[in-house]
Image (cartoon, rainbow, N blue to C red):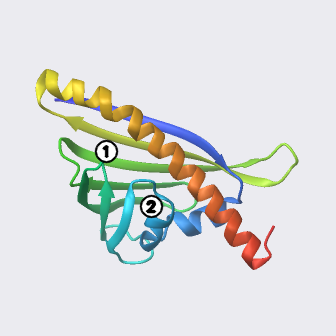
Amino acid sequence: MNRFVVAETAVINAPLGRVWDVISRTDRYAEWVAGAIEVTDHHGLATVGKTYAERNRTLGPLKTDSLWTVQEIEPLKRRVDTGTGFAPLQDLTNTFEFRPVQTSDGREATEMLYQVEYTIGLGPLGLLLDSIQQPAMRAGMRTSMANLNTLLRSEDTNTGRR
């Protein structure tokens, strides 16, 4: 089987603590994760060893149910979850990494790495499927981070934070 790593990075225009508050809430994923239609089961705050479930969009009109397990939490720096339910992708690992940065005008912001590692079987057919799904996965990651940025800005505007 072939192992693949797909990663995208973006700057979120919010302080690291605010970003961490939202990504740590498994019940909020459908608010910002591009492929998540709904969170069907959750434990609220991400906790190592706990699971959460989602209904997700995959390629085109296809939908799937996924189950995620929180594997690692390094507060304000890194979160790693493993998931099932995305056949033919297997051994799925989702990693978020964060570091504080400053915007050009000196405001606090957060650089976010969104990375997915997986294997895909099916020999040459798997490689063909991956060449089709990988651009969509990258686009979904970029959209997710843009959604997170928008969500945080919206909440800050509604609460008077700046």
Q: Is residue 56 above or below residue 129?
A: below
Give the labeled residue for mark 2.
73
**Could you tell me which quadrant the C terminus lies in?**
bottom right
**Image location (x, y in percent) of residue 114:** 48, 45
Outermost right residue:
105
Within the image, what quadrant is residue 40 found in? bottom left
Q: Is residue 42 above or below residue 99?
A: below
Are there few (<14), some (14-19), or many (20+) residues within 10 Å of tag 1? few
Q: Residue at x 37, y 49 (%)?
A: 94
**Could you tell me which quadrant the N terminus lies in?**
top left
Within the image, what quadrant is residue 5 found in? top left
Identify the amino acid type marked 1.
Answer: Gly
In this picture, residue 64 sits left or right of residue 78: left
Identify the amino acid type marked 2.
Answer: Ile
Q: Nearer the viewer, residue 75 or 12?
A: 12
In this picture, residue 142 sits left or right of residue 128: right
**Image location (x, y in percent) of residue 44:** 42, 77
Circles 1 and 2 in contact, beta carbons < 8 Å = no
Query: Which of the two labelled residues, at mark 1 and mark 2, occupies the earlier sequence position?
Result: 1
Q: CA distance from mark 1 to mark 2?
A: 32 Å
Give the labeled residue for mark 1.
60
**Image location (x, y in percent) of residue 147:** 57, 56
In this picture, residue 79 sits left or right of residue 132: right
Q: Residue at x 62, y 64 (%)?
A: 151
Outermost top residue:
124
Within the image, what quadrant is residue 132 found in? top left
Q: Nearer the viewer, mark 1 or mark 2?
A: 1
**Image location (x, y in percent) of residue 21:** 58, 69
